[in-house]
Amino acid sequence: MANGRLRKVAGGLKRSLKTMAFSEVVGRERKHLNLLAFDIGGTTIKHGVVTAKGDILQKGSDATPASMALLLELLQDIKHRYAADYTLSGAAFSTPGIPNQITGFIDGGSAIPYLHEVPFKPKAQECMQLAVSFENDANCAALAETWLGSARKMKDIIMVVSGSGIGGAIIKDGALHRGANGYGGEFGYMVMNKHGETFSGITSPVELAKRVSAAKRTNIDAVRVFELAEAGDEVARREVDRHFYYLAVGLYNLQFAYDPEAILIGGAISERCDYISRIYEKIDLLITANSMADLRPNLCKCRFGNDANLIGAVAYFNQSFRPKPEVAG
């Protein structure tokens, strides 16, 4: 386990996950399934009804509660809202941290500390009385894009999601690569310079905004930082340039470490029309300085934007509850 501690998940659920999976999910025709999908973020929980084919029928959002008890209440409330109009066959979660598929805990850390204190999966299953799957948010985004999005026909990709931190995922030979300890794709922890700054700390939009806010003794977000940079503000221009430089360094290194078909860039900030071209400007400088390594990464924008995690959560649900082929006796 990521935290080195052995955790035991208490039993006592009235209906086991296996029973729910086979009787309520696998036994139905998949094309008729409606799933309740959740994307749990530090400030907002996005949710919606998504078909097993990846079509979003309805969606909404709520503020992230302050405790696990309040979160479970909210999950029940959201289920009841949608259940008035849809028959729900399961709940698919995109979460921060590292979902442990054995214990049901969410290992690692995130902006929502209480998520890591209890076995999330059985708690969610018990309160919702539905079959439940859960997967890391960046992994969900990667699954969405390889299932139905920008990387649909690709088998080897890297996903980099830029938000409050830097999330990442690796799809190798068409499947998620988790690594020996579950940290595969956690690119945000990469150390980028001799000062010990991490890929997440030096390139995430939230950290960019914090640095400019501190320098200007104000409180602005990343969108405003880019606006100031375009208007010629020297502090903002310097920090935005630094943002793209280190983003290029990280992506350049990942290209040579994994040699993927494409590196997909996600997160709200990546929707800027010049975002990828600005990264390429810095990558081309790196290539010019290193003539022995002239492979230019194939950078692609994500297709699904803010819906990627909902769709990817359903993709993982489909994989989790896929019927196993019968073995001839």
Image: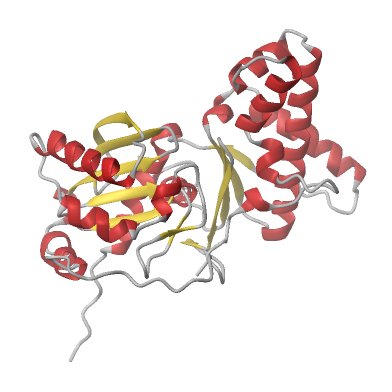
Instruction: Look at 38% across and 35% down and name the residue there.
Output: 307
Position of residue 303 relative to residue 160, above or below, is above
Locate residue 269: give its quadrant. top right
| Frontmost residue, 275 versus 31 | 275
Instruction: Look at 59% across and 20% down and name the residue there.
Output: 221
Kindly give the residue lying farthest to the bottom in the view shown: 329
| Frontmost residue, 88 versus 205 | 205
Residue 207 drawn at (x, y percent)? 65, 32
| Frontmost residue, 120 versus 26 | 120
Residue 329 drawn at (x, y percent)? 17, 92
Position of residue 243 relative to residue 122, above or below, is above
Position of residue 179 relative to residue 44, above or below, is below
Instruction: Look at 36% across and 35% down and name the residue there.
Output: 64
Please indicate whether residue 133 sits to the left or right of residue 239 in the image.
left
Kindly give the residue lying farthest to the left in the view shown: 84
| Frontmost residue, 284 versus 97 | 97
Residue 17 drawn at (x, y percent)? 21, 66
Please indicate whether residue 316 sits to the left or right of residue 288 in the image.
left
Residue 75 drawn at (x, y percent)? 23, 42
